[in-house]
Amino acid sequence: MRYFAFVAALLLAFVAGQYFGNAALLAKINAYFAEALSDPKTSAAMASAIFALLSLAVQYSIGRKQAVIGTRQAEASRISADAASLTAKNAGDRAIATMRIEWISELRKTISEYHSILMTRSEMTEDSHLKLSDLGTQLDLLLNVDDPAQKALWDVLDQIYKTTGIDNRQKLDVDLISAGRAVMKEEWEKIKREMRGATVQ
């Protein structure tokens, strides 16, 4: 360590002499180097110190490169994790959109059956009442009454069911179609956003 400091001091002095143009200092340093190198032990010690200095410089350079590589690897890992997370989210959104499409299809089919019975039969048989009861239960389970559009649709369906006389029920047909379309439109908008990967409330 003593030789390392010694060589470092000499090198600094040499550089300073060269830079500032101090000929006397430069001559003294050259003379000192010539005298020091004439002694084998001193030469070996200086060589060891220079080798140690060079080793430190190489290790420092390698360490910096490894640090840069480590930083790049960490950034690549982060990007990869972000991409995996986004892929999973998009897959989840599409799965929800698919379930929503199936729900719309089931709702449309159930309303159509319910509507067909109520709008075409002036007299209800026992089988008709049983079928309407079954369809009404399905609609009750399919619709979310906390959603304003779905609540409006349920109210129209219930009103038609409770209305006597086919002519009176048919007068409510426009309200039913309007309420049904409002629900379908709302759900299709959600599906489009889910397919694009947007969060739907």
Image (cartoon, grey):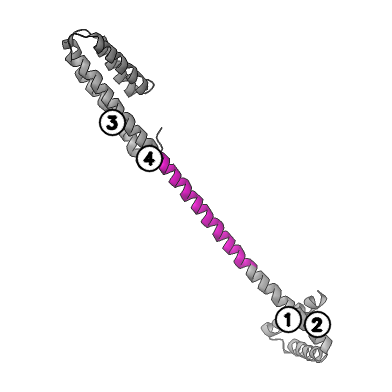
Query: Which mark identifies residue 45?
Result: 2
Q: Quadrant of residue 180?
A: top left
Relative vertical location of residue 177 with respect to residue 20 in this rendering, above or below:
above
The first of marks 1 and 2 along the sequence is 1
Q: Which mark is residue 94?
A: 4
In the image, which residues are magenta?
63-92
What residue is at 78 percent from the left and 76 percent from the top? 4
Q: CA distance from mark 2 to mark 3?
A: 88 Å
Using the numbered discs, state the Cα–Cα distance from disc 3 to disc 4 in whole angstroms: 18 Å
Secondary structure beneath disc 1? helix
Name the side, left or right, on which 182 lies relative to 62.
left
First in sequence: mark 2 vs mark 4 = 2
Earlier-in-chain disc, 1 versus 3: 1
Q: Which mark is residue 25?
A: none
| Residue assigned mark 3 | 185
Q: Residues within 10 Å of mark 1 (few under 14, many from 20)?
A: few
Q: Are marks 2 and 4 in contact (CB under 8 Å)?
A: no
The quadrant the C terminus occupies is top left
Disc number lying in front (2 or 4): 4
Residue 11 - label: 1
Q: Amino acid at mark 4?
A: Arg
In what element is the residue under mark 3?
helix
Amino acid at pointer 3: Lys
Q: Measured from the top left, where is residue 85 in percent x and y?
A: 48, 46
Measured Cα–Cα span from mark 1 to mark 4: 69 Å
- Looking at this view, is 40 or 25 the one in front? 40
Q: Residue at x 44, y 42 (%)?
A: 89
Q: Secondary structure at mark 2?
A: helix
Q: Are marks 2 and 3 in contact (CB under 8 Å)?
A: no
Check residue 97 for magenta coloring. Answer: no
Judged by depth in the image, the label closer to the viewer, 1 or 4, is: 4
